[in-house]
Amino acid sequence: MRGSGQDDAISAVNALSSGGGTNIAEGLKKGVRVLEERHEQNPIASIMLLSDGHDTLNDDTRSLYRNVQNLTSNPNYSLQYLYLLPASICSRNTASGNEARRLSIPVHTFGFGSEHDSNAMHAISDLSGGTYSFIETVDNLQDAFARCIGGLLSVVAQDVRLTIQSLSRGVQIGSIHSGRYKNEIFNLGQKATIDVGSLYADEEKEFLVYVSIPASSRGEGEAKLDHMSLLEVLCSNKDSTSSEIVESRRERVVIRRPKVLSPTDKMVCLEVDRQKNRLAVADAIATAQRMAELGILDHAQAVLSEQKTTLLSSVSAQAGDDLCKWLEKELTETAQRMATLQLYEQSGRAYVLSGLSSHSWQRATTRGHSTTILPGEGANGINSYETPSMISMVSKSQCLNGGPSQQPQMVTKSCSLTPRHK
């Protein structure tokens, strides 16, 4: 913004007044109208929603709208007023035939304090493609916004899609674990796609693809192949200048097919193992959360404890992997916030849902009481999905507020951004 634009924005904010109550649905409708009526239609647009309470003005509409259990199998979506949300946020509210004209707007939600409706905030962000952050104290509010804005200001690619193609007879794609990113498998496992959407600078997305490989065999007189081509992976995205879809990268996956396996061939791939751990921990936390909602906290604790034991015995954890250390910390804190039903309702539910939001989109969220980036941590430490741009923006935010005692180390964590992505 120019100086005059900043002055106008400040005047508009200062002109707002509070009339009491919480009306999340109307607030989001207003946000959508602002974006739809913009004079400058820049390609990247998001809404950031902060709330410290429940939607008090739409509670009485529950009997007037269909049950939304059909939206998803997640019980947290059984919120009737989701049908009040604009189609730009909740695509399932789009009238038939209007899909192509619909503007898609992700909503990044921030639940503040112990009284906010964490189920609603998580549902709104998840349905729209945004993230949900839990802000436990007001001291972390500015840093939470800074982390989110740091990512939004660093978008380097849009409409990113991965296309996976089988290259050899008998090789079939069985399943893809991609979190909330949509994936489809076609032609009896011969082809698959993953829709990634936008990518921030230096951001990485990692997906597990399970592939069925036929046994190695050869007919009489045929030479046995030492290598086998499994898959071809193509990455495409929208060109920022022409708005056309262009191919950005193409790679082949090839494996060895030796007659006798060497000790190296039998070694577990640490990268695959750590991703299996990440998905298993997220699944265990989701299972524990469902049990906590039913009030059976002892079963929830047992699930978390069992998963921690499995995690620590994995090959990647035994090798000292940083992600596994972070996952262990997450399981420990989740268990602590599920110690009693009162503690779970006060902060545990919000902490868990913000964590599940982070895992499902592989994007950093603020969880609980701390946004501090400790020395030696960051992208693979206390907040596994943080990018250099997020770290830099949080550091600037903390400098504005005087910063914590370890601020000098955090400043040195800031990196110059390069327009690259994986």
Image (cartoon, rainbow, N blue to C red):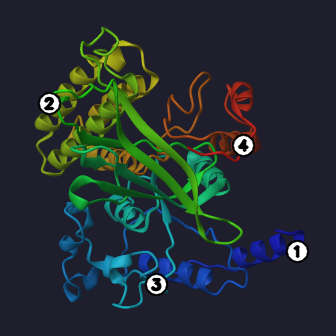
Q: Which mark is residue 4?
A: 1
- Going from N to C along the chain, the mark reached first, 4 or 3, is 3
The CA span between labels 1 and 4 is 31 Å
Against 127, residue 300 (above or below) is above
Q: Are marks 2 and 3 in contact (CB under 8 Å)?
A: no
Residue assigned mark 4: 418
Q: Secondary structure at mark 2?
A: helix
- Going from N to C along the chain, the mark reached first, 1 or 3, is 1
Report crowding for label 2: few under 14, some 14 to 19, many 20 or more residues within 10 A (C-alpha).
Answer: few
Q: Residue at x 68, y 79 (%)?
A: 41
Q: Quadrant location of the C terminus?
A: top right
Q: In the image, 343: left or right of 370?
A: left
Against 194, residue 30 (above or below) is below
Circle 4: residue type = Thr
Report crowding for label 3: few under 14, some 14 to 19, many 20 or more residues within 10 A (C-alpha).
Answer: few
Q: Secondary structure at mark 3?
A: loop
Residue assigned mark 3: 100
